[in-house]
Every structure is written in C-alpha cells, then in structure tokens.
Amino acid sequence: MPKIVVLDEITANQIAAGEVVERPASVVKELVENSLDAGATVITVDVSEGGLKSISVVDNGSGMDKEDARLAMLRYATSKIRGFEDLDTITTMGFRGEALPSIASVSKLKLKTKSPGKDTGYFIENHGGSIVSSGEVGAQQGTSITVEDLFYNTPARRKHLKNRSTEGSLISDFLSRLAIAHPSVKITYKQNGREIFSSPGSGVLFEVLASIYGVRIMCEMLHVDSKNEQVQIKGLIGKPTIKRSTRQQITVIINKRYVKNNAITQSILEAYRGLLPTGRFPVAALHIAVDSRLVDVNIHPAKMEIRLSNEREVCSHIRHSLRKALQTSLIIPQESEKQNRFELFLPETTAAATEYKQEEFFLEPSPEYPGVALFPSLQVIGQLHPTYILCKGEEGLYLIDQHAAHERVLYEKYLSGFSEGLNSQMLLTTYPVHLSPTESHQILGHTKFLSALGFEIDYLGGNTIFLRGIPDNFPTADAEAYLFDILDYLTAAGAPDRQDLLIHLAARTACRTAIKSGTKMSLDEMRELIKKISSTENPYTCPHGRPTLVLYPYKELTRRFLRT
C-alpha cells in the first residue's frame, strides 16, 4: 500500500475544524459573520451551558435557496469570492468556505433558511459531517442555525475547554466587539434563555458603547475624528480617569472587522504614555478605514489577526490623533458627586455622539475639532498645606499639585534635551561607584548603548566603575542615582529600548528634582510654575499619570452651599 493516502471528506473537515473551531466562541464568530455577510440587521444568539450544549444563531439576512444551502455544506464552497484575484480586495467577513462544514463535522448542526421571493424555506440536518435529513420547511426570511453537542465526536477537544461560565464570557466579549464594529446591526446575546447583552442597532457608536459599558463611563469618553491620505480614524477613547488593569477594553476595528494587531495596540498605549499610571490601560473603541488592498486578513484561519502594508504610517497617525484628542482641558478631573456629573455631562456627550451613524461613517471627511484646548487662564490666590497651589479660573476653583506640575515641566524639558542631541556633560568631580556582580554585568553588557545616550563610564576592574559624564541638560547633583535608575530599568526590561529608557530616565529624574510637597513657594514662584506648565505639551498629568490639577466647578460649589 502507498504511504500517502487522500483523506476522506469527514476527516479533512475535522482537521479544518481544528483550525477554525477552537471553542464555542469560534462557532459563534463564524456563524454571526456569515449573518453579517448576508446583510442581516437583526441577529440573535442564544447559547446553553456556555455553548457546549447548544448554540443558536438566528438572522434576518438574505437566506439561501435549496441549491445554495446544500453547497454551503461543502468545503471551499463560498459566495464571498470567485477566484484568487479577489483575495487582494476582501470586503466580506468570511471567505474561506470552511465554516459550516467544519462546524458540522464536530457537532450536530441544524440549518433552516429562506431566501426572498420563495414560498417555503429549506432545512438540512448534519451530524458529524454527514447529512441525515433535509427538505422543504416553513420559515421566516433569513437563516437560523443550531449547533448541538459541540465536539461530541472529538472528546479530546472538549476536555480542553474552560468551564461553562468562561466559555459564555468569551462569547459575550466577542459579540460586544462585533456590535462596536457594526453599530447599525442589532445583536442580542442570551445565555440559557436569559438576555445578557443587546445592542440598539441605531447606527450610533456612542449608544452601542453605552449598552456595553454603561452611560456613566461614556460620559468620560473623548471623540477622535482624524483623516489623512492613507487612513481615517473615528471613535471614542477614555479620559485618563478611566483606568483598567488589562488592555482588554481596547477595541480596534479595521474596515468594519474586529482585529488584533500588536503594533496598533501599542500605538494607542503610547498615546497615553505619561497620562496613566504604570500597569493601567485605557478604554478605547476605534474604527480605522484603510484601502482594502493594503490589508491582508488571510494570515490566520480565524481571520482575527491582520497584516497592514502601511502599518507604520497607520500607527503613527493613530498616535498623533489620540495624543491630540487627549490634549484637552476636558481630562482635568472635576470634583462632583457621580449623579451630578452624570446630569452635567450626558446631554452634551449624547448630542455629539450622533455623528457616529454607520451609514455616514466613512463617506465624507468630517471637519476637524477646532484645535487643541488651551490651558485654562488662572490667577494664583494662595498655597494650601504647602502642597497645593490655589487658583481661580473661569470654570471654578483649581487646585494644582506643585510637585506633579513641576514634574511635568522638568520631564518635558529633559525629553526635549534628548531629542535635540544626546551630548555628554562631564562631571567636575568623579568618584568610584561600587556595584554588585549583577549590576556590573548589566552595565558592562550595555556600555555602547549607554555611551550613545550620553553616559561616560570607565571600568576600573572588579565591580567598580567611574561615572565621568551624564546626558546634557540633566542636573549633576545626583548623577550616581541616574546610573541606578538605569540598572533598575535594565533589570525590569531586559533588552534595552532607547526611547523607552529615555522616557523612563526623564520621568525618574523629574520626580527626583521637582519641588517637593511641603515646600513653601512665593506668589512669584507659583505664578512662574503656572506659566511653565501651561506651555507644556500635556499639562494635565505628571509623567506617571497622576493629575496635576483638579477643578471644583462653580456649579458644584453653588450646589454644596445650597445656593441653587
């Protein structure tokens, strides 16, 4: 017998299922994306026991006739493309033609569908890849698919799934992101008959996000609307006051497809650099439109990961656009009770949200928001507990943290010095610095890297060095501390990144040399600090993400003194 054999259809489908159908959420993804490609505007997903017992997807799309329904059960059968050349301009969610046969090969699948103009629908029942029954049936226009006993014939796959609650949560997470990608489609998710999530299907992105995160969170979101020759970005991003412990609440939509792309996610995080504390991440939902010819969605069977031909340009534009949106006085924390904040900001936010109707989403360029908001005009009126500078402004009473504000000023000064050239300034006095063996290894292993940054280091033997020079523009009083800052960075980060180290070093140095809490300042000194921070790129947070100032609005003061 020959060693090489041609696999039968059922075995081939089960192998394909291993790539496409990893868990219940994968089944939901494939089926719902087919519904979207069929033009559905209403999709209902109902799962039982986290999708392990059953998954039902019902839509009001275009449906299929008898011939198409039977063809859909075959591998490589698809209505999405006609040939190889179509792979360069994919605009549909699915296109491989493997979803239905792959799912059917590892489950008991029932399909019922009806296309427009037909008097009756058609049903197919497929168990483990074999059609067991089919025929005409009464049906509403659209398609309904029920998947039961997933992986019943591949128990090894089933035992590696998470518990029912986790599998159900993964489905909920995917559907919520799909609703963000398609605001005009009403998507309802039920578990064991109980509604978990339902998007409004209004075409308004704000309303979709409100159904997911709640209206109160949405009142803390900022609009992004930017376009250049290669990319258009629209969406909503959280103010730095909204912090999450993971990056899971960052949703990136490219050409109406929810995707994962590390470079784009990193560009979003870089826009927030210095605005959020270390280990905290923003909430963001961005729609990105690029030429479909520049997008490769065919690098993974699940079509979740993509490759962009112009990735560098897209990431640069995202960073710039988000940074611009965040350079606004709207991110100044305002002291007010939660219910009052809701009443104050909801009407304006809701009105602005009407721009996000999907049918208008990428048709015409939107007008730019009118420039970066200026730092508020403030008049110093005193110092409190000598830590906070008290100022009055047009909106109310401002409290400025003198240490955080001075940190921001020094941080940008040091970074600017780096960008202008990494020259060294020689120290007037040098003395030996004794290191541990580990510290010595770190320093000696990166001497060229450190020299390029402006550090002049001589090796004396053993674990002893001389620090002779530091980067220009840095204060020389505590030069040795910079060296240990670098050691801390190298220990935590491993492979050094030039820009990341410069930012780390500038932030640590600014913190060390800034005016300390408890330091008394004259009126002239306070005025000078206000003048300096007002001219920084981002005056509203320190380099570590703490706010530099807090606003007590006059409206809030009036309410608290019962002067309404």
Image (cartoon, grey):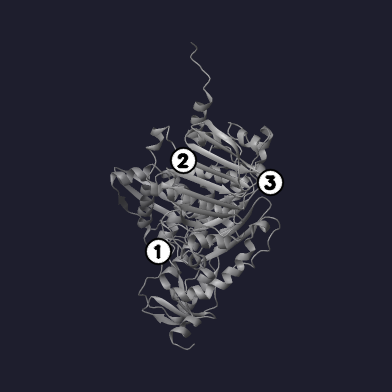
Q: In screen coordinates, is 401 left or right of 373? A: left
- Residue 21 is situated, as x and y percent measured from the top left of the image, at 49, 38
Question: How many residues crowd around disc 1 within 10 Å: few (fewer than 14), some, or many (20 or more)?
Answer: many
Identify the residue position indicated by label 1 in the image: 511
Choose between 120 and 72: the one closer to the eye: 120
Identify the residue position indicated by label 3 in the image: 116
Choose between 302 and 59: the one closer to the eye: 59
Q: Please give the name of the residue rendered at 64% of the width and 36% of the height, measured from the top-left corner.
A: 66
Q: In screen coordinates, is 199 left or right of 479? A: right
Report how far apart the C-alphas of labels 1 and 3 lie in the structure. 68 Å
Q: Is residue 68 above or below residue 412?
A: above
The three-letter amino acid code for the residue at tag 2 is Glu
Q: Secondary structure at mark 2?
A: strand
The three-letter amino acid code for the residue at tag 1 is Cys
Q: In screen coordinates, is 54 left or right of 137? A: left
Q: Residue furthest bottom?
A: 563
Identify the residue position indicated by label 2 in the image: 148
Count of numbered labels shown in the rendering: 3
Which is more foreground, mark 1 or mark 3?
3
